[in-house]
Image: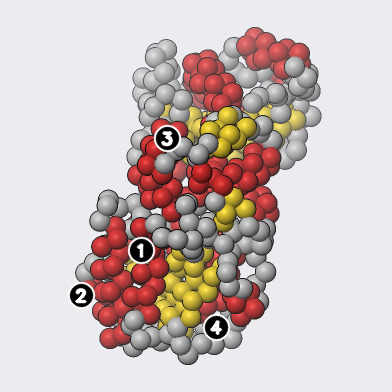
Amino acid sequence: MRRILITGASGYIGGRLLRALETRASRNEGSETLQLRCMARRPENLRGRVAANTEIVAGDVADPASLRSALTGVETAFYLIHSMAEAEAFVEQDRIGAANFADAVSAAGVKRIIYLGGLGSGGELSRHLASRQEVGRLLRDAGIPTIELRASIIIGSGSLSFELIRTLVSKLPIMITPRWTQTLAQPIAIEDVIDYLVASIFLPVDTSRVFEIGGADQVSYGELMREYARQRGLRRWILPVPVLSPRLSSLWLGLVTPVYAGVGRKLIDSLRNETILHDQEARRVFGISPRGYAEAIRRALINEDSEFAATRWSDALSATPHARGYGGVRFGNRLVYSQALQVTCGPVQAAAPIMRIGGNRGWYFANWLWQLRGILDLIVGGPGMRRGRRDPEALSVGDTVDFWRVEAVEASRLLRLAAEMKVPGRAWLQFEINATRQGSEIRQTAIFDPAGLFGLLYWYASYPIHLVVFNCMLRRIAAASAGGRDARAGDGSGRSRSSEIVHK
């Protein structure tokens, strides 16, 4: 049995690695049994996200005493900690953390360290890349065989680089771009990064090694933006200018992508360095053939849709710190408006009017508005409302419901409709029914994935209408679920008298 410690398991890379290793362990893949242990400053944040046989221990690289118990009995330790989101002291924090960890693994008798660092060359390295490579040197100084993988831009749903590309391309039809968008990189898909990390556990080495890993293609950030726009069906114009410094670029990034303003300057400062492979040893030693950048983007979009479709909004929205706001909540590129209403009947009865929605029965509120929307859709070449539905009582995946199509349906639990009317983006309308002590909760969620600036304008311009229509529609569905007896009567303000319509 090989005990493996993962630091940074609550982060993007660590979380993906943990999932891959848990899957491998559950399937008994390979000749060795893996026992996984995760170290976290706040173990409670990981509970509920790991398999039953994955151990969670408290530990912090800034606290050397906490590392002793975390490393006891460990054979292989992953170091996936980086202070990029911290203040200007991140270089010193990374240095102290790496030095503490190196001392602790040496004392604990760990046999191997695996570290994911940053690829960079071309003159003086940025503080960010220089810090990443310094951490690798400090870990190698422990005197234990250390495998350092130096990666270029990582492309995957949820990765910082991919989110920046997506946000810039989605928001700006015309981009005036600085010099750093022409710097060459060798982007690598997240799946390939995880393959390298997993393979590093079993790689026969008795000394420290540094491997450069990257995808099949050398491209610029500008080319990544163009490819993302192409796959999303967006027309974008990129106009490079030579005058924007990294500082000005980071301020500009903070304006158009405020979520990432805190790390934007460090990231952009790193983009002056080429991140291309000068050594092909990793492909020979590991036998891994990484994907090209177009395939990496395609996979990221597929994975994002899959993860998004599996989201339970009752859980996701309750975990969102800023759940209220005009236009709903943003999840990645998507905009979400969700509300819930409690009724006293059971899930089967609560779901019945939802499963009969559309067609001759209509949409429970303002049917004339739905008809008007259908006429406008016909004018611009959409299907309109003329398709109706196949069966007035039952729904199956693939059925049409006016200008929607059933994407997912679970009896008495879920109905998700994907829009087929003409909209500047993609849209869904989802209903969830959950049993509660009082009866059932009906959750209605409108989801919109805008295509560029016009898509955003469409969402915010139509939001007041959607707010009224969806609120009244939900109350009518609740009333219909119990024949008007068990639903909570509304006072017209968007709240019910006996139970609140919860906007999240």
- Mark whose residue sits in front, 3 or 4: 3
Residue at (71, 32) in percent of width and height: 405
Q: Which residue is mark 2?
A: 65
Nearer-N-terminus badge (4/2): 2
Q: Which residue is mark 4?
A: 203
- Mark whose residue sits in front, 1 or 2: 1
Give the distance between the C-alpha atoms of the residues marked 1 and 4, in whole angstroms: 26 Å
Q: Which residue is mark 1?
A: 131
Give the distance between the C-alpha atoms of the residues marked 3 and 1, in whole angstroms: 25 Å
Residue 28 x %, y %: 58, 78
Give the distance between the C-alpha atoms of the residues marked 1 and 2, in whole angstroms: 24 Å
355 lies left or right of 135? right
Instruction: Identify which amino acid the numbered label 4 is placed on.
Output: Leu
Residue at (29, 57) in percent of width and height: 90
Residue 334 x %, y %: 53, 36
Q: Quadrant of residue 340?
A: top left
Residue 313 x %, y %: 48, 40
Q: Secondary structure at mark 4?
A: loop
Q: Which residue is mark 3?
A: 252
Estimate how packed mark 1 is, as few (under 14), some (14 to 19) or many (20 or more) residues with alpha carbons within 10 Å. many
Front-most of residues 340 and 213 = 213
Nearer-N-terminus badge (1/4): 1
Instruction: Identify which amino acid the numbered label 2 is placed on.
Output: Ala
Give the distance between the C-alpha atoms of the residues marked 4 and 2, in whole angstroms: 30 Å
Q: Quadrant of residue 136?
A: bottom left
Nearer-N-terminus badge (3/4): 4
Q: Is residue 426 above or below residue 134?
A: above
